[in-house]
Image: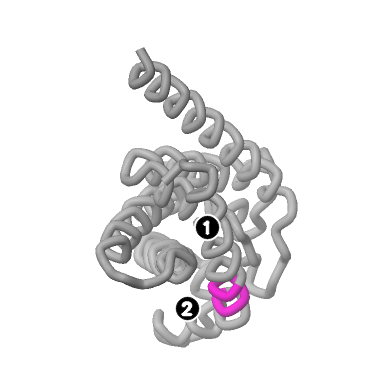
Amino acid sequence: MTIKANTRQSKVARMTLLALLIAILVVLGYVNIPMPAGLSITFNMIPVAIAAIAMGYPGGVIIGGAFGLISFAQCFGILGASALGAALVGYSWVLMFIQRFVSRVMVGLIAAFVFRLMDKTRAPLYIKGAVTGFCAAFFNTLFFMGLLVLLFGSTPVLQESMAGRSALAYIIASTGVNAVVEMIVATLITGAVTVALRKARLI
């Protein structure tokens, strides 16, 4: 009976955590910091990393998918706004869905993989979480921008933003400040939250 009760409590705790993380994603959708080129600083990858740490691949996929759906909705002014998304979604909403959704699901998978690898090391728990948070932010930028250029690089909107630069030069110029800020914040916060998750017996 005790084992069953503990299992039930664990499932409830994880479902509660998932609901909380989705709620945080919705809130964060409205607090993006606008930057040049229609992009913005976002911290939505942090809940994705936390879910991946606490619940492995399923958690990463669920919260990563929720992040992707919210990001796609923002192209239509729902749950926030994305200037670049609004400018590009008219070319193909299918490609936009792929760019917004798939990139974020991949972040969830990568974060779960990284934490699983880190958990096999003797590194302090904070470091394990911090590395996972850093990777979530890094790959969020990499996948998001990579698919953006791959799928929409030939559109007039992106061609104007690229101004004749190569894809790599455009990505670096567009995300320099954004990426650095996101990686620093994700690293620090995810590391601290990982320690809190252990204290709460969620990992």
Badge 1 element:
helix
Quarter occupied by residue 142: bottom left
Q: Point out residue 64 in the picture as x, y percentages from the top left corner.
A: 44, 46
Badge 2 element:
helix
Q: Residue at x 46, y 51 (%)?
A: 100
Quarter occupied by residue 73: top right
Q: Main secondary structure of the magenta part?
A: helix
Q: Quadrant of the N terminus?
A: top left
Q: Locate residue 90 relative to residue 39 in the image: left or right.
A: left
Magenta span covers which residues?
A: 179-184
Say whether residue 197 is visible.
yes
Specify the label residue 104 is tagged with: none
Q: Locate residue 52 relative to residue 158 in the image: left or right.
A: left
Q: Which residue is mark 1?
A: 195
Q: Residue at x 45, y 87 (%)?
A: 169
Q: Residue at x 68, y 50 (%)?
A: 28
Say whether residue 153 is visible.
no
How dense is the environment of label 1, judged by Cα within 10 Å: few (below 14), some, or many (20 and up)?
Answer: some
Q: Does the stretch in magenta take in 180?
A: yes
User: Which is nearer the N-term, disc 1 or disc 2?
Assistant: 2
Q: Does the stretch in magenta take in 19?
A: no
CA distance for labels 1 and 2 = 33 Å
Q: Nearer the viewer, residue 141 or 85?
A: 141
- Relative height, residue 159 to residue 169 (above, below): above
Q: Residue at x 37, y 60 (%)?
A: 151
Name the kind of residue labelled 2 in the image.
Answer: Ile
Q: Which residue is mark 2?
A: 171
Q: Nearer the viewer, residue 21 or 123?
A: 123
